[in-house]
Image: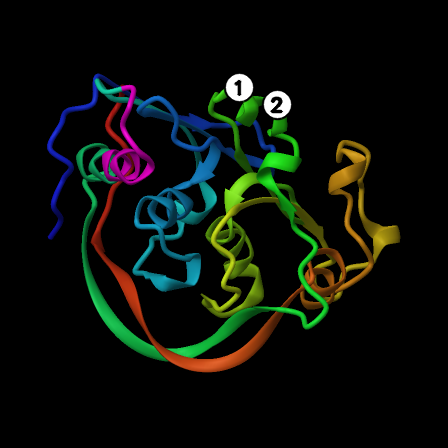
Amino acid sequence: RSTLFPYTTLFRSVKLNQSGDQSARLGPPGRGSITIVNYPLRGLIVQSFRTQRNLVFGIPNWADSERYDVLGKGPDPKALNPEVWEMMRSLLIERFHLKYHIENREMPVFALTVLPRGHKLTAGEKGRCAEEIKAGTNCGDIIVPPFGAAMYNMPIGALITSIGARAGRPIIDKTGLTGKYDVNVTWLQDGAKLEDLDLHDIPPEYRPQDVSLFEGLQQQAGLKLEPERAAMPVVVIDSVSRPDPN
C-alpha cells in the first residue's frame, strides 16, 4: 500500500495536545526533521500525502477532534522536503497503524487563479524570511489561525492546503505561481459576526476581515476560486488507530 522512504528515523515523538488552543503550527521540513504543533490526525495525513482535507475519506471522528504534537528527526540533515514528508507517512503507518489506498473520483472542485490585475503575494526573498534566505538558512512556516490562513516563504500549494477544507471543495492550482511567498488571508465563516467573536487572544494580524473566504482571497491575495469538475486522486483510509506511546 505504500513505499516507505528507505531510511529509519532516529527520533519520533507523538503526544496528545490538550491545551484547548485552536491554533496550529506546521513547521516546514528542515535539516531532515519536522516539528508539528496542535494538529489533528486528518491534518497529519493531508500533509504527509501532500493532498487536501476533503480528498481524504474514511477518517474516524476522533482523528478530526484530537490534536497532536509531532517531532520527527532523521539521520540525514540534508534530506529534502519530499523525503521528510515520506518519513512522516512512515510515522503514521508505524505509530497510528495507518492502512490506506488511493483511487480517483470525479467531483466538484475550485480552480485557483490569479486575478487579471495580478496577485498580492510577497516573494519569500522580500518577506519575513528575507534575512535568513540571504544567509542561506532555513526559514518558512504555515500558520493556521482560527479565522484565516497564513504562510511565509512557502509555495502556493501550502495556501491551497490551508484553505481547501474551508472552501468546501478541493482546489486545483491554476495560478502558474512556482515560487515561495508570504501571504495572510483572514475572513469570517458563513453566518458569523465580528461583534460576536472573542478576539482578545488573537494577534491583530490574524483577526478576521468582515468578508467571506472568496472575497478575502480576492481582496487580500489577488486570487480567485472558480468552480469546475475534475477527476481527483483521493486517499481512502482503510484503518487507523490512536498512536502507540512514545
Quadrant housing residue 146: top right
* 10 Å crowding of disc 1: few (<14), some (14-19), many (20+): few
Magenta stretch bounds? 77-88
Tell me the quarter of the picture where residue 125 sits. Answer: top right
Inspect this view and state whether residue 29 appears: yes
Q: How is the image coloured?
A: rainbow
Quarter of the image where one finds residue 41? top left
Q: Which residue is mark 2?
A: 131
Question: Image check: 81 left or right of 104?
Answer: right
Three-letter code for the amino acid on which mark 2 is drawn:
Glu
The relative height of residue 197 versus residue 142 in the rendered view (above or below) is below
SS assignment for the magenta stretch, majority: helix
Q: Are marks 1 and 2 in contact (CB under 8 Å)?
A: yes
The residue positioned 11% from the left and 53% from the top of the image is: 1
Q: Is residue 218 left or right of residue 48?
A: right
- At 72% from the left and 68% from the top, the residue drawn is 117
User: In the displayed structure, does residue 152 sit left or right of residue 31?
Assistant: right
Nearest the viewer among 102 and 178 is 178
Q: Which mark is residue 135?
A: 1
Percent x, y for residue 195?
A: 88, 52
Which x, y percent locates residue 132? 56, 22
Task: State the residue in front, 74 or 115.
Answer: 115
Which disc, if any, is residue 86?
none
Residue at (11, 33) in percent of width and height = 6
Q: Amino acid at mark 1?
A: Ala
